[in-house]
Image (tube, rainbow, N blue to C red):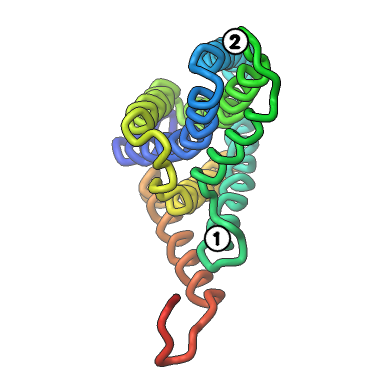
């Protein structure tokens, strides 16, 4: 199989979109904090340099993937996706059952603002520039890795790149509207869905890489996602703390 069917393309778009949106929400939190606290000049400069660095990263490493045999690429990519997917899945489950603190974007905003207030001010604030650059670049690297690995292995790099681009634009627009109210974004739910989809893709491509032919071809992706989804529900239901009958949640 050299390309995904229409259902596979939709699943690919959704996975890349959600993964990119999660990362960009975290980056946006830092950029908004920098802009509000130190002025938008340093924030915009940091974002611009980070985007240039990411573009150089794609130009440098993107074409190299085309030289790797497809079967080997799918085994490697499948393994990476399975590992990352299970990590996201595990953390999302731990947050759902209360064993790990959920990301609080407003708290991250406040922490970033406090750190910036401690820095020395100047015409061009170096600390603000570095923090904006770091936030966008580090989160952007994860988006780039997701786009390149998923897109190249599925022969749909354009679809993956478009999904990431739509996510970035949408998060930026929403961020401009809601500004500091980023805690309303259901990040943990998004991470759980992305973890499930990454694990499904990883399982699918590892099998294809070693020569397995899945029943239904790309529809097997939906089956794997459903299996991981049911497993998630079972794990959360079994590990969630149970309150005595007659008591109400605080």
Q: Residue furthest top?
A: 123
Query: Can you say which quadrant of the picture contains the N terminus?
Result: top left
Q: CA distance from mark 1 to mark 2?
A: 35 Å
- The residue tagged 1 is 95
Q: Is 47 or 141 nearer to us in this picture?
A: 47
**Tag 2 secondary structure:** helix
Q: Is residue 57 above or below residue 1?
A: above
Q: Visible in this render: residue 178?
A: yes
Q: Residue at x 44, y 61 (%)?
A: 229
Q: Residue at x 47, y 39 (%)?
A: 22
Residue 239, labelled with which disc?
A: none
Q: Is residue 215 above or below residue 247?
A: above
Disc 1 vs disc 2: which is toward the camera? 1
Q: Is 103 or 140 nearer to us in this picture?
A: 103
Judged left or right of residue 54, residue 1 is left
Residue 56, labelled with which disc?
A: 2
Query: Can you say which quadrant of the picture contains the C terminus?
Result: bottom left
Judged left or right of residue 84, residue 179 is left
Callout 1: few (<14), some (14-19), or many (20+) C-alpha neighbours within 10 Å? some
Callout 2: few (<14), some (14-19), or many (20+) C-alpha neighbours within 10 Å? few
Q: Residue at x 47, y 46 (%)?
A: 194
Judged left or right of residue 213, residue 179 is left
Q: Earlier in the sequence, mark 1 or mark 2?
A: 2
Q: Quadrant of residue 52?
A: top right
Q: Residue at x 62, y 9 (%)?
A: 124
Q: Is 27 or 34 nearer to us in this picture?
A: 34
Residue 169 locus on image (x, y percent): 36, 24
Residue 23 locus on image (x, y percent): 51, 35
Q: Visible in this render: residue 200?
A: no
Q: Is 37 or 127 nearer to us in this picture?
A: 37
């Amino acid at each position: 199989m050299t390309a995904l069917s229409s259902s596979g393309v939709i699943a690919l778009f959704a996975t890349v979109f959600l993964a990119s949106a999660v990362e960009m929400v975290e980056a946006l939190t830092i950029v908004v904090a920098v802009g509000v606290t130190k002025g938008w000049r340093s924030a915009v400069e940091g974002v611009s340099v980070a985007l240039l660095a990411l573009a150089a990263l794609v130009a440098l490493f993107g074409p190299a993937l085309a030289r790797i045999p497809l079967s080997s690429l799918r085994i490697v990519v499948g393994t990476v996706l399975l590992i990352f997917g299970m990590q996201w899945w595990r953390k999302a489950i731990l947050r759902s059952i209360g064993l790990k603190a959920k990301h609080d974007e407003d708290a991250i905003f406040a922490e970033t603002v406090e750190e910036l207030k401690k820095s020395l001010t100047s015409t061009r604030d170096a600390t603000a520039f570095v923090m904006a650059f770091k936030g966008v670049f580090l989160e952007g690297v994860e988006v780039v890795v997701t786009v390149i690995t998923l897109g190249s292995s599925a022969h749909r790099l354009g679809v993956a790149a478009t999904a990431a681009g739509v996510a970035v634009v949408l998060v930026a627009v929403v961020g401009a509207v809601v500004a500091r109210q980023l805690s309303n974004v259901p990040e943990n739910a998004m991470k759980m869905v992305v973890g499930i989809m990454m694990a499904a893709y990883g399982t699918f491509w590892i099998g294809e890489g070693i020569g397995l032919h899945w029943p239904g071809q790309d529809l097997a992706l939906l089956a794997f996602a459903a299996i991981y989804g049911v497993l998630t529900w079972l794990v959360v239901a079994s590990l969630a703390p149970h309150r005595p009958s007659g008591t109400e949640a605080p």
